[in-house]
Image (cartoon, rainbow, N blue to C red):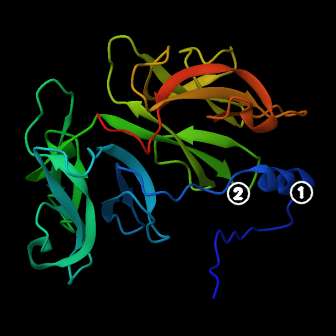
Amino acid sequence: MGAIDEVRVYNGVRSAREIDAEAKSRLPNRTRLPAHGRVNDFRGDHRSGNGPMPMEYRREMTVGFHPPPGTQGTHMLYSCVTTGDGDSFTSRRADCEGQKSLGPLGPAYTTPPSGMTTRKLNRCKVTAGWQERFDSLSPDCEGQTVEEELGYLLPYTLLSRYQTFDGPTDRRSDTGDAPALYRMQRDLVALRFGDVTGLNPLYLCRSGTDTYASDDATCGGDDAEQLETLGWIWPQRPGDPAAQELFSCAEIGELKERFESTDPDCEGQDVLGSLGFGLDPSRVTR
């Protein structure tokens, strides 16, 4: 018995250009990464994880990466859900504090390791209304209640590429919270959190309907606008064996829609240049 994979549903008739772009694009990477991602659904429920999620959840952000399993000085984090109101939460306890366990998420350092940069992860609780729980790097839980310290994660965020499934064709590389018309296409690189000496900021830019990443704060043109800072990237290849170069690309054709790729040949399209180096998200260890 086989399995059905990558089912796609569209409104209206696809153009020849859209069908051709779909045929050339790779399928999404479903490898379970060591990223601790935060997603939310239409109810406002937050869940953390690094694998496939129920369809109603969309990635909001990545709060860090887990150290490798078995790393000294770590404990396991678990994905849990309450049996009453269905509130998803993260716990340090394998029994999910008496609630339903959805399985292990990955390790976290119990205390900050010497000689390494990490970020403290808190479990938070909404103060008013439905008091659902969520994970945050914010010391004050984004203005909500700090419920528990979960541990310390590696300071990286996941850059992924999204593509519109309706309207003007656009590929957008983002670290989460992409607009609803974008579907996740593939993971690209892990970017560093925070302003780090020797690293350059990578920006999300827009010109018209074209969204793209740039290492230029002006986004390379008078008609372009900077939307946000995605993370920090190495201008030269670092010593980490997981280093992965990221390229700026443009579609061959009239529109010259820009996108990002880890393929040096830009997947058969025009190579505009290197944006720098992130890390292969499946190989982040420190």
Q: Nearer the viewer, residue 248 or 220?
A: 248
**Separation of marks 1 and 2 at Cα, in angstroms:** 12 Å
Q: Residue at x 58, y 49 (%)?
A: 186
For the question of whether residue 229 can be seen, the reply is: no
Q: Residue 159, percent across and down?
A: 49, 39
In the image, is 214 to the left or to the right of 123? right
Q: Residue 7, percent across and down?
A: 67, 72
Indicate the amino acid at tag 1: Ser
Q: Residue 50, percent across and down?
A: 38, 57
- Density class for disc 2 (Cα within 10 Å; few <14, some 14-19, many ≥20) is some
Q: Nearer the viewer, residue 119 or 40?
A: 119
Residue 90 image-quadrant placement: bottom left
Q: Residue 252, percent across and down?
A: 86, 33
Q: Residue at x 23, y 70 (%)?
A: 80
Mark 1 sits on what residue? 15
Mark 2 sits on what residue? 165
Residue 267 image-quadrant placement: top right
Q: Residue furthest bottom?
A: 1
Q: Residue at x 9, y 45 (%)?
A: 110
Q: Quadrant of the C terminus?
A: top left
Q: Residue at x 82, y 31 (%)?
A: 256
Q: Is residue 155 above or below residue 50?
A: above
In the image, is 259 to the left or to the right of 16? left
For the question of whether residue 22 can be seen, the reply is: yes
Q: Are marks 1 and 2 in contact (CB under 8 Å)?
A: no
Q: Is residue 196 above or below residue 192?
A: above
- Density class for disc 1 (Cα within 10 Å; few <14, some 14-19, many ≥20) is few
Q: Quadrant of the N terminus?
A: bottom right
The numbered dot on residue 216 is: none
Residue 116 image-quadrant placement: top left
Q: Callout 1: helix, strand or loop?
A: loop
